[in-house]
Amino acid sequence: MQPYASVALFHGAGRPFELRQQKISQPHPDDVLVQVSLATICGSDLHTVTGRRTAPTPCVLGHEAVGRIAAAPPNTRDAYGQPLREGARVTWSIMAACGHCEYCQARNLPQKCEKLFKYGHARSEAPYLLNGGFAAYICLRPGTAIYPIPDAISDVEATPLNCALATVLGGLELMGDKAGGCAVVQGAGMLGIYAACCLRERGYEIIAAVDRVPERLRMAEAFGATHTFNLSDHSADEIGEALRDLTHGRGAELAVEVSGAGDALVNSLDWLGVGGSCLTLGFVFPHADVTVDAHKIVTKCLTVRGNHNYHPSALGTALRFVEATRNRYPFGELIGAIYPLKEINAAFDRAMQGDSIRIAIAPEKAQFDGVA
Ligand SMILES: [Zn+2]
Ligand SMILES: [Zn+2]
């Protein structure tokens, strides 16, 4: 193994990434070193580089990633309790949790652990310099759920799972099933597209995707959306009427908000029928102030439920979901282009254009040439 790893350091909004060589180390005897194969730029990375939310600097961003075990201490186990082998392809929970605190134990919310550590969101400082995915190596701390990637799933298919798909599946698990019903997905970016196929597989008959970007809506259709509405072409009232027409006048049973747009929450309460539920996942930046008509929550007996991060078991669910459904949905097409680490600034510029669902960064780009 090399003694140094290339890392891309984030120094604050509006400043370019700096490429630097950092010493590879395992500060804790139970740390696991992973050589990063591929990392994708998540919407929250974009929030950070644009200053919509802050990160301690310098910081190695990137939390959607996959790689190969480079060094694992003896007796370290994966999330299924199996020994970790060097060279194994793995993905991991975006956070490490202590396993002992009130949130980890009594409340079953390890994603909100009192000692939570979140990859791609922490200051890069000694002894932990390799905390994020936009680097050749990442150091995984004890309390991280590490999952083997099934052979059938490619790195391109697997990379966004440990943030986007696990978040969606973890959220949907909280909502229970209403098979045969109508669900509306607000926002057809990565989470919304994943939500479409998850809802399809959960038995929803009508899955309506709402966005302003036609390409995203087309992708949502490829992932199981039965109806799409472009908010640039239809008013919220028109969409609400169309949803009521599709549901014998009742309205949707479930709304999944993944856009982070204030109107999406307002519209969800409008479009839901009596007894409906809204899962909101998109407001991952502070001061997302929204004015809603709370009268609708009361009189329609609505449930509004938020979720942040995910229970680590949702990542295992995500891997099994893609393994089982990869022949039905084009998971491999969600990454529009792959850039080498040294071109990370160009990669972020491209991601900012918003014409691709995901842009990826491969520290060892050569192995992916020809993919995108
Ligand atoms: Zn993310
Ligand atoms: Zn804890």
Image: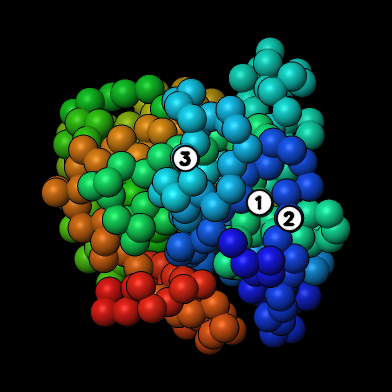
The residue furthest right is 126
Identify the residue shown where x is 63% and y is 37%.
Answer: 73
Q: Hey, what amino acid is under mark 2?
A: Ser
Q: Label 1: which residue?
A: 139
Labels 3 & 2 near each other (Cβ < 8 A)? no
Q: Say whether residue 293 is left or right of residue 24.
A: left
Confirm if mark 3 falls within 8 A of ligand 1.
no
Q: Label 2: which residue?
A: 25
Q: Position of residue 89 (x, y in %)?
A: 41, 49
As measured in the structure, the alpha-carbon distance from the residue carrying label 3 to the one carrying label 1 is 15 Å
Q: Quadrant of the N terminus?
A: bottom right
Which mark is nearer the camera, 3 or 1?
A: 3
Residue 145 picture quarter: top right
**Which tag, 3 or 1, sits closer to the chain's start?**
3
Query: What kind of element bears circle 1?
Result: strand
Residue 332 seen from this side: yes
Labels 2 & 1 near each other (Cβ < 8 A)? yes
Residue 236 picture quarter: bottom left
**Which tag, 2 or 1, sits closer to the chain's start?**
2
Query: What kind of element bears circle 3?
Result: loop
Q: Label 3: which residue?
A: 85
Query: In the drawing, what numbered circle is on residue 103?
Result: none
Residue 214 seen from this side: no
